[in-house]
Amino acid sequence: PPPHLCGVVVAAAPARGEMHAEALAEALELAKTKIASGQDATVHLDEADDLIAQLRIDARGREAKKALADEEARVRELRDRNALFAGATSTAKPTGTQRLETTVARAEESNRRIEDTRDLINDIEETGADIMTELHRNKDTLQHIDGHVKETKAELAKADKTVTRMSKWWSRW
């Protein structure tokens, strides 16, 4: 991931955070390239906003949140530049090919988001299974401890009876 996003990646789930940070850097770079060539970069800027939102979910710590705020500022700046430069060259109606490319790009983005969501769901399911296993282990441990407590109480009751009988025996002398 880009160096300025390393704090976000460390605080987030490492694999997912690294993947999102790299995708964010790529989306911003593509947006810059399109803006520099006078093309509309809205699709890439929207993607960057979505990735920032996903990173924000996992971000912990002041540095990670500051890095994300900086990235949001970069996206706003690129949006402003896109509105100035891309708007001047894209006043003509899009051709069928351009509409097709835009539709394909949106479909690919949707597919990527679906895959990211599936990965997130799998992570959540795995974490849930781990938690359930740990809870089952804890239940067994507590039942075992409860059995020991009952045995100890029974032994203490026996000892109490024995001490009471001994004290009666000694008090006769």
Image (spheres, rainbow, N blue to C red):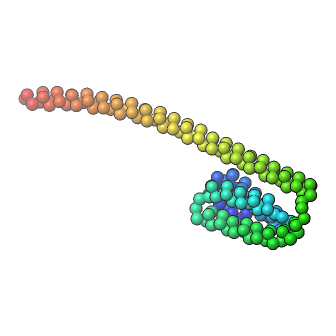
| 151 to 22, vertically: above or below | above
The residue at the point 76 percent across, 67 percent down is 79
Counting from the top left corner in percent of width and height, residue 111 is at 78, 47
Seen as rendered, the residue at the extreme left is 173
Residue drawn where x is 74% and y is 46% of the image:
115
Judge by depth and name the residue closer to the eye, 65 or 138: 65
Compare residues 130 and 68 and report the one nearer the observer: 68
Residue shown at 27% from the left, 32% from the top: 156
Give the image location of residue 33, x and y in percent.
Answer: 84, 66
Task: Answer whether residue 64 is visible to the viewer in this image.
Answer: yes
Residue beneath the point at 70% across and 47% down? 117
The image position of residue 6, as x and y in percent, is 67, 62
Q: Is residue 44 above or below residue 131?
A: below
Quadrant assignment for the C terminus:
top left
**Is the N terminus in the top left, top right, bottom left or bottom right quadrant?**
bottom right
Give the total number of marks visible in the rendering: 0
Residue 10 visible, this angle: no
Which picture quadrant has residue 60? Answer: bottom right
Q: Is residue 51 left or right of residue 159?
A: right
Residue 122 vs 140, above or below: the answer is below
State the residue in front, 50 or 138. Answer: 50
Would residue 108 be found to the left or right of residue 134 on screen? right
Q: Nearer the viewer, residue 165 or 42?
A: 42
